[in-house]
Image: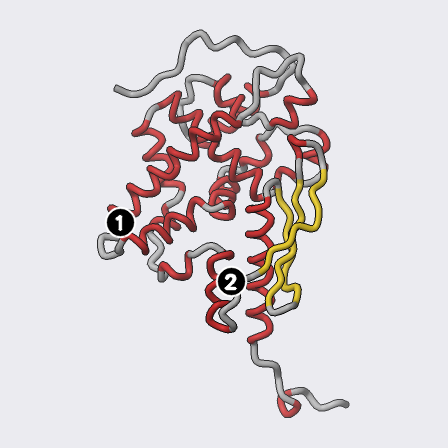
Amino acid sequence: MLPTTSRNTPPSRAGTGDVDQAQGLASRLGLHVRDLDLLGQALTHSSWLHEHREIARGHNERLEFLGDVVVSLVVSEALYARHPDDDEGALSARRAAIVSTPGLARLASRIDLGEALLLGEGESQRGGRRRPSLLASSFEAIVGALYLDLGWEVVRDWLTELATPELTSAGPPGALKSPKSRLQEYTQRRTGARPDYRVLDMVGPDHERVFRVEVWVDGEVLGAGEGPSRRVAETEAASQALDRLRADRRPRPSASDRPAAS
């Protein structure tokens, strides 16, 4: 039996804009969404709720909690079926890459999710519609709402189609590891040490907290990142460090390769 939501959902209040946003998103998804109020709540960030307490029904964090589990199960089932020769470690690496913050943000971008989100003015001005961590968490909320409204089979089929490029990738599983894992493996091979992540500061109110982090390798700052949690900021810093290490390993043109001065 497919899960359903209560039909006692309160009607939309004029002026909130959430149902209009939900209708537009449902049209892009190509799904017959029944509970637009629930989908509208999935689009509502806590920053918008704090600025519109008098008309908001709630934000999307509970739906994000549910959607996180649904996404993981859909991806796990699809990878198990599509990669029969992979062992548990390889499947875990593939799943981790797809459900990571950058991976989910990529899926969110495919449905133009950022444009549909209801964000507070400050969050919107700080580029929240393009921030990977916000897109990833909102995508999970959308999946949670669709699961409650339409059930497992519909959400599974929609999500596996959306994530087909990642699910069918034939790349080596090692390349799918998180930036933090890859950076740690590199430093341990090179010196036996681990990257040192240092929190520079935490700014903003609780519902809009931003962490800024640096990563040190061999006594040198190789990357910096920021995000709504320390984990997200560390991941961004590790990704930047890997980019720098790759750039440093590229061969530089020798004097004989440079064009002669005119």
Report the disc number at residue 183.
2
Q: Is residue 142 above or below residue 229?
A: above
Dot 2 lies on which element? helix
Q: Where is residue 42 in the image (x, y as percent from the top left)?
A: 51, 26
Q: Where is residue 107 in the image (x, y as percent from the top left)?
A: 47, 42
Nearer-the-camera pick, 184 or 61: 184
Q: Position of residue 213 (x, y in %)?
A: 65, 52
Q: Position of residue 143 (x, y in %)?
A: 43, 31
Check the image and tell me how it is coloured.
secondary structure
162 on left or right of 84: right
Instruction: Name the residue located 44 percent from the left edge and 32 percent from the top edge.
Output: 29
Look at discs 2 and 1 and give the one toward the viewer: 2
Instruction: Name the residue located 59 percent from the left edge and 59 percent from the top edge.
Output: 196
Nearer-the-camera pick, 167 or 245: 245
Label 2 crowd bin: few (<14), some (14–19), many (20+), radius 10 Å: many
Q: Is residue 157 above or below residue 4?
A: below
Q: Would you name the residue on which mark 1 appears? A: 82
Amino acid type for the residue under numbered disc 1: Arg
Instruction: Name the residue located 33 percent from the left edge and 34 percent from the top edge.
Output: 156
Q: Residue furthest right?
A: 262
